[in-house]
Amino acid sequence: MTQSKPKKYSLLVATSMGLRLTPVNSQPFHCSDMFKMQATSAESNVASVSSYLGMPVKVLTAFVKGSPAAHFIKDNLKSRRMDFEGSQFDQGGPWGYRHQINMADSGWGARGPRVQNDRAGEVGRELSVDDFDLDRIFGDEGAEIVHLSGLIAALSPKTSKFCLDIARVAKDNGSLISFDLNHRASFWKGREEELARTFAEIASRSDILIGNEEDFQLCLGIKGPEADGQGLDEKIDSFKEMIGRVQEAYPNAKYFGTTLRQVVSANCHLWGALVTDGEDWEIIKPREIGVLDRIGGGDGFVGGLLYGILKGWDVKQCARFGWATGALAATMLTDYAQPADEEQVWSIWEGNARVKR
């Protein structure tokens, strides 16, 4: 039954929080001895746009009890103005649970970034709805949009069920469901049939579907473009045709989106986006942006898109705001966008980088 009372949270995300280690001064990881550490996850990156712009946000996750890494992560989420809750898992000794570690440099010039994920013993693999009061979270508190990603849905059999259960309960309580497909081949290996069923059900309950051409093909089995080596206009046309097939397969979804990226160098990208609300399209052909650190740009786009939907904007405004928050994330040392206000974001869209006094 859909509830009609106001919802406490604008956006709720389910995630496995971890740590990112990044060499200072854009150096390669393998020859560095000084690193910046930050709390990170794709889903909390998405939520940061709304939280920094004043919307109430909640994070569902898991923590290692007594871990200094967990303490660091909690402090970071608080600094991002996010509410959070999650079970505390005993570490279980030196070979037990921990928060995953993302080792990622930023690249520089002709040297592209390199990323390695160390997810052994990741506590987030234990996420289960048995550890949360879903009646309170979705019935009493409520969330306008619940954002899920394929990274969490494919992390483990437990998290697959967790995301399915969240999608079912949230939908029954009147939330919109956002699903960023985020295919990762290493996560799917040996679980292809199981995950195909899971992703198809989540997508069938989703109102907002986000992914690139490979995501839609590999996660949902949707036929992709016919030919390789297409030019930009042909690629856009092929994507629009594929979205038409997705709309037929998943008629509940209204919004569909993807980003377009061409890498000139590690510090210069051409950045674009395609978004439709099922009727109108906004096509942003790639424009040059400066890049300090590319990681999190796609999450920034999703965060801005969802913010626009929450604000009730039309598809053109939503897409342009998402493009700009993605571009903003690429200028920051964190891998999430921290907009000062909407004006800053719209100035990025307008290409206005003049000093504001």
Image (spheres, rainbow, N blue to C red):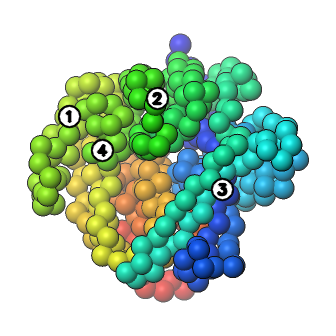
Q: Residue at label 3?
A: 101
How much space separates mark 4 and mark 3, taking CA atoms? 26 Å
Q: Residue at x 12, y 57 (%)?
A: 230
Query: Upstream in the sequence, badge 4 or badge 1?
Result: 4
Q: Indicate whether 176 appears above or below 26.
A: above
> How many numbered discs sit on the rendered protein?
4
Q: Nearer the viewer, mark 4 or mark 2?
A: 2
Q: Quadrant of residue 178?
A: top left
In the image, taking residue 45 as reference, residue 209 lies left or right, namely: left
Mark 1 residue element: loop
Identified by mark 4, the residue type is Glu
Question: Would you say residue 12 is visible in this rendering?
Answer: no
The residues tagged by marks 2 and 1 sit, at their Cα atoms, a distance apart of 21 Å
Mark 3 residue element: strand
Q: Secondary structure at mark 4?
A: helix
Identify the amino acid type marked 3: Ile
Above or below: residue 189 compared with residue 345? above
Q: Position of residue 8 (x, y in %)?
A: 65, 35
Return the disc, 4 or 3, that comes first in the chain's sequence: 3
Return the mark for residue 223.
Answer: 1
Kindly report which numbered mark, 2 or 1, lies closer to the viewer in this rendering.
Answer: 2
Q: Residue at x 81, y 36 (%)?
A: 89
Q: Which label sits in the foreground, 3 or 1?
A: 3
Mark 1 residue crowding within 10 angstroms, few (<14) / some (14–19) / many (20+): some
Which of 143/111 is in front? Answer: 111
The alpha-carbon separation of the residues under discs 4 and 2 comes to: 18 Å
For marks 2 and 3, the one nearer the N-term is: 3
Q: Which residue is mark 2?
A: 191
Classed neighbour count for the residue bearing mark 3: other residues with Cα under 10 Å, few (<14), some (14–19), many (≥20): many
Lower sequence index among marks 4 and 2: 2
Q: Nearer the viewer, residue 342 or 205?
A: 205
What residue does disc 4 label? 214
